[in-house]
Amino acid sequence: MIKKLTAHIGEFKRDTMLAPISVILEVILEVLLPVLMALVIDRGVEAGNMNYVVRLGAVMLGVAMLSLLAGTLSGVFAARAAMGFGRNLRKAMYDNIQDFAFQNIDHFSTAGLVTRMTTDVTNVQNAFQMIIRMFVRAPIMMVSALFMCVNISPRLSLIFLAALVFLGGVLAFIISRAFPIFDEMFKGYDRLNASVQENLTGIRVVKAYVREDHEKEKFCRATENLKDLSAHAERLVVMNQPVMQFTVYTCIMLVSWFGAKLIVVDGTMTTGQLMSLFTYTMQILMSLMMISMIFVMTTMARSSAERIVEVLDEKSTLVDSRHSVLEVEDGSIQFDHVNFSYSDDREKCVLRDIDLTIHSGETIGIIGGTGSSKSTLVQLIPRLYDVLDGAVRVGGHDVKEYRLETLRNAVSMVLQKNVLFSGTILENLRWGNKEATEEECRHACELAQAHEFIEKMPDGYETLIEQGGTNVSGGQKQRLCIARALLKKPKILILDDSTSAVDTKTDSFIRKAFAEEIPDTTKLIIAQRISSVQDADRILVLDQGAVAGFGTHEELLKNNEIYRDIYDLQQKGADFDE
């Protein structure tokens, strides 16, 4: 895990090396100061030699200034290295997420990925900064100060050895208990983020159904759970501070008592040595406090690091073939005895033995009840998922033989959930083709029956779309997404229930435009209304993930009971509306 993370230090290796070097220089200079102070007291103050005091005082001032400079530089280098490391981690995670297949994305929740790229990276970044400064400073300071203490008084140094053993045991206890709680706490952050994200995304639905109190209660439960976990973890962590203070005060008292005895009774220690011993005592104990803080921080960061590495290690389930076909010749599609399961479990297949052939340029309607896996079927064509058994062929080749970029550039999909991005209408349209001219964008909008309402907007095609497309209606959003798909000039166009929010007249105009303007493009139209697909060349009827019928409108009315039932039901509804 550590090797995986440190690989992303990248171009900040120089700062990562300079930070601890500066810290080491700072520690050496700080350890020298008590020695100089002892000399000032013993040879200057007690001897009444003021010239010696002034000269050595000037040396101490120079050493202190150099130590301050080294400390400042270590802070600058460490901050630069940590911020760069955090940036590289976020970029690596984001880049890997962009390569995820739908199956990989299904493995992580959206809120979980957001938490990993924000809170978790911040924790690891802060721990990294602490490690290259404090984790270098504290052990070196402690060992150096202990060495000086042993030189001054080996017997008094035993006090610090006992303190080290005691604090080590306490710290091991805290870490062993706190780590599982921190791990659960970050899952709590995931749940909290999920609650916020869901609420803000669906705020209009929340208000329409007057569910504000329900959402507040759900959010309160998430925050209460997070508070309880945080409080539990903090109750363990805060034990560290009083134990450290108790140890510090105990050591000072013992050093004062035994040190005074060595000066007054035994005469084996000077006043200057005792004063320097006090300074080393504080340096040792402050180093111990730093080490304990580092372990607490790294315990918290360990949970975050594991969650980050999970994202970095996740490999796309879709891999380009080594001998990729570089061009999709036509829009023909063949499903060859296809089985598919989201969990790769043959007992839980949502598509079963799909076997059919679609000719290039055909318009195919797809009808079926809720849960009949209509959307799942068409998602196999651009290889958003891989089949469990059988094969899907496009243009005469198995989709696995294409480079993903090649295949998906030849297939345009307007998904069930229409998504627009912040920016102008033109910028959204050019997601289909970034090189499209304004004239090409207008033509695509005319085919999708979007041009008329765009022209009525204050800024026309330069009108800004708010985040999520909240300032356009559902029907307008659908038509803009269809126009965006058309700009790809695809071999295959898939509309996944993409005209459900437009009236039947507009729906008819869109289908007519498709027939006249893109006759060579294979068109797959998933619809709930039979009127949207009855003019198709053929219609596919799905029932519980299996093919229940495949033929023209007239053939299915005559031979397919499921299709006929849907048609009769919709006709009765239409008669009732009239």
Image (cartoon, rainbow, N blue to C red):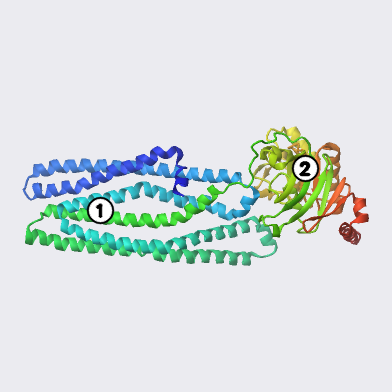
Q: Is residue 238 left or right of residue 205?
A: left
Give the residue number, with chain letter if any, for mark 1: 283
- At label 1, the amino acid type is Gln
Q: Residue at x 49, y 42 (%)?
A: 88
- Which sits in the foreground, 513 or 523? 523
| Residue at disc 2, secondary structure | strand
Q: Determine the image quadrant of residue 518.
A: top right
Q: Which mark is residue 493?
A: 2
Q: Determine the image quadrant of residue 208.
A: bottom right
- x and y percentages locating residue 434 in the rendered image: 68, 35
- At label 2, the amino acid type is Leu
- x and y percentages locating residue 311 in the rendered image: 54, 50
Q: Residues within 10 Å of mark 1 (few under 14, many from 20)?
A: many
Measured Cα–Cα span from mark 1 to mark 2 = 71 Å
- Which sits in the foreground, 206 or 168? 168
- Label 1 or label 2, whichever comes before in sequence order: 1
